[in-house]
Image (tube, rainbow, N blue to C red):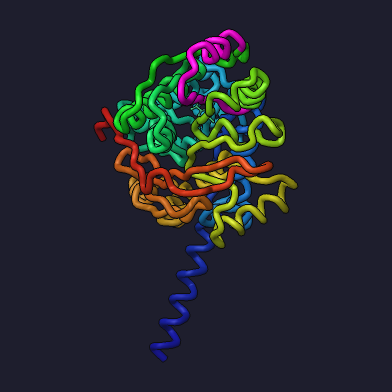
Amino acid sequence: MNRIRFALTAAALAASVTAAQAQQPPLKVGLMLPATGTFAALGDAIEKGFKLHVQEQGGKLAGREIQYFKVDDESDPSKATDNVNKLIKRDGVDVIVGTVHSGVALAMARAAKESNTLLIVPNAGADAITGPQCAPNIFRSSFSNWQPGYATGVIAAGKGYKRAMTITWNYAAGTETVKGFTEAFEKGGGKVVKDLSLPFPNVEFQALLTEIAAQKPDVVFAFFAGGGAVKFVKDYDGAGLRKTVPLMGSGFLTDGTLEAQGAAAQGLITSLHYGDNIETPRNTAFRNKYAVAYKANPDVYAMQGYDAAQMLAAGLTAVKGDFKQRDALIAAMKKAQIDSPRGKFTLSPQHNPTQDFYIREVKGNYNVVTGVAVKALPDPGRGCRM
Ligand code: PHB
């Protein structure tokens, strides 16, 4: 009798929890990503990755329907504060997911901190976001700019190169990635003899390529991404430099770009926290599902979007979808181990992924992993007080 009553009470309780969950309104997710400009394809891949994970969970996270609000940030820092406030103030979103461009993301992080809105950065590497601008409500599913730069510097020094030149866009992602490269390359016995740059998102590379040809360094390190990376790799090859001065870069140089770069990219060596042929059941399943859903291969950006959703899901699940339990939700996100297609990762105390950086070589349309440059590389998190 007692046992029956207990069973009935438990069933009633379970039914009421489910009913409470069902009554919760949809969780409002603001996607602030580039839909136009040189990073448009990157924003598209992030959104597809995020939505793929939500779809896998039946269109809900921890029982909550998801309602999307979208803003095209155009990768334009001068419009970033206005754009992010459309999501925070006009739409009243619970969570913001964005963005690609470091300069835009820095403004988003400021607005998120001021309004205490949960922010998950699915790409932009601006070091300050998990450094001096860190905050309990700001997380990253991607990398800090320092990380892939540093890992590529380890590879370049390991190859015995002594004199390097660097080339990039003159904004946070470029300068910070170059800084990471220089730190590791010079620690490994090399010397960066010259840094070249041009304003974002310019692609008039000829004068700078002429300078590289004149200086003949042992290696060139480049940070470019998206449409700019396509043009740079083709121009480097077109100038006849690929055969005489090896070109290396953080893996964004060749990720999501290979079909457009074609022969010009073959053999390039880069480092990144993802590669196309990571042969784990987790990555294979991700790639297959992505290909079925979107008729395209996923890239690093798709993977980072997917993991932003996984991080949000980890927090929401811990509070059974009750977003008002913010402290418990954030505590769960902080200590989650994310089962990512890249390999499992955890977050540093500053909320940046501590992850392996692979050595990758371009073969055909794939960035093929040939080894690991640095295992479980944490961002130093310099300047973060939390
Ligand atoms: C950035 O601005 O932080 C950024 C943009 C594109 C990338 C990587 C980093 O591929």
Residue 19 is covered by the magenta coloring: no
Above or below 107: residue 145: below
Task: Name the quadrant containing residue 226.
Answer: top right
Residue furthest top as drawn: 207
Q: Nearer the viewer, residue 244 or 46?
A: 244
Q: Nearer the viewer, residue 149 or 5?
A: 149
Q: The N terminus lies in which quarter of the figure?
A: bottom left
Residue pictured at 45% horizontal, 35% vertical: 119
Horizontal and vertical percent position of residue 202: 60, 13
Task: Name the quadrant containing residue 289.
Answer: bottom right
Q: Nearer the viewer, residue 348 or 138?
A: 348
How many callouts does the rendering have? 0
Above or below 335: residue 91: above
Horizontal and vertical percent position of residue 290: 66, 50
123 sits to left or right of 327? right
Residue pictured at 48% horizontal, 69% vertical: 14
Q: The C terminus lies in which quarter of the figure?
A: top left
Residue pictured at 61% horizontal, 59% vertical: 285
Residue 211 is covered by the magenta coloring: yes
Task: Name the quadrant containing residue 230.
Answer: top right
Above or below 303: residue 239: above
Identify the magenta region: 206-226
295 sits to left or right of 18? right
Q: Is residue 34 visible?
A: no
